[in-house]
Amino acid sequence: MSRELSCAPAVPVREGPDKKPLAVEGLGGGIPLKKFFMNLKILKHLFLYGLFGVLATLLDIFTYWFSTRALKFSTIAGAFTAWLVSMLFAFLTNKKFVFQSESKSAAVFLREGGYFFLCRIATGALEVGSMYIFVDLLGLPDMIIKIITNLTVIILNYVASKFFIFK
C-alpha cells in the first residue's frame, strides 16, 4: 500500500466561496486566520523577548564572573561592567530581532538607545526601591518580593520597548 505525501496544512482550514482560507478549525468553531496568525506573531515575539532576556542574564553572570575573577575588578566594578555589557546586548538584540527596528539613522539609533538605557535605569531603581520598602521596611519575605518585582520589571521593560522605544 503506497502512501501519498500531502501538502495539506496540519490543522484543518475552512475555505470561503472563493476557495481562500477563512479560518483555522479548532475549539469554538474556528479562529479567523488573521487572528490565528496574529497570535502566532505575538507568541514568536514573546518567545524572542524571553530568549534574549535569558541570554542577556547569562551574559551578565559570565561578565561579572570574568570581570571579578580574571580581571580582578571589585564587586561594584564587576557588577557595573556586567550590567553595561548585558544591557548593550539586550538593546541590540531587542532592536534587531525582537522589535525589528530597521532604522539606519544615527539619530534614531541614539534616541532608541538613550530611551532604552533610561528605561532600564528607571526599572532598576523601581526594583531596588521596592525591595527596600517591602523587605527592609515592611519585613515581607525577600524572595517572594524579588520574584514579584522582577516580573513587574520584565513587563514594564517589554511595554516600554514595544510602545515607546522601538515604535
Image: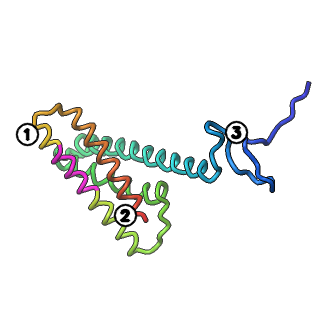
Q: Earlier in the sequence, mark 1 or mark 3?
A: 3
Vertical relation: 43 (above or below) 121:
above
Q: Nearer the viewer, residue 75 or 156?
A: 156
Residue positioned most to the right: 1
Structural crowding at the residue carrying mark 1, measured as other residues with C-alpha within 10 Å and reported as few (<14), some (14–19) or many (≥20): few
Task: Write the residue at 26% across / 61% down.
Answer: 118
Eye-nearest disc, 2 or 3: 3
Disc 2 is placed on an element classified as: helix
**Residue 38 rendering spot, x and y as whole percentages:** 56, 52
Task: Write the residue at 21% across / 47% down.
Answer: 127
Q: How many marks?
A: 3
Left or right: 20 as drawn, with respect to 73: right
Which mark, residue 164? 2
Left or right: 26 as drawn, with respect to 135: right
Task: Write the residue at 32% across / 41% down.
Answer: 62
Q: Residue at label 1?
A: 137
Q: Quadrant of the N terminus?
A: top right
Magenta stretch, residue numbers: 120-130
Q: Look at label 1 and name its amino acid.
A: Leu
Which mark, residue 66? none
Q: Earlier in the sequence, mark 1 or mark 2?
A: 1
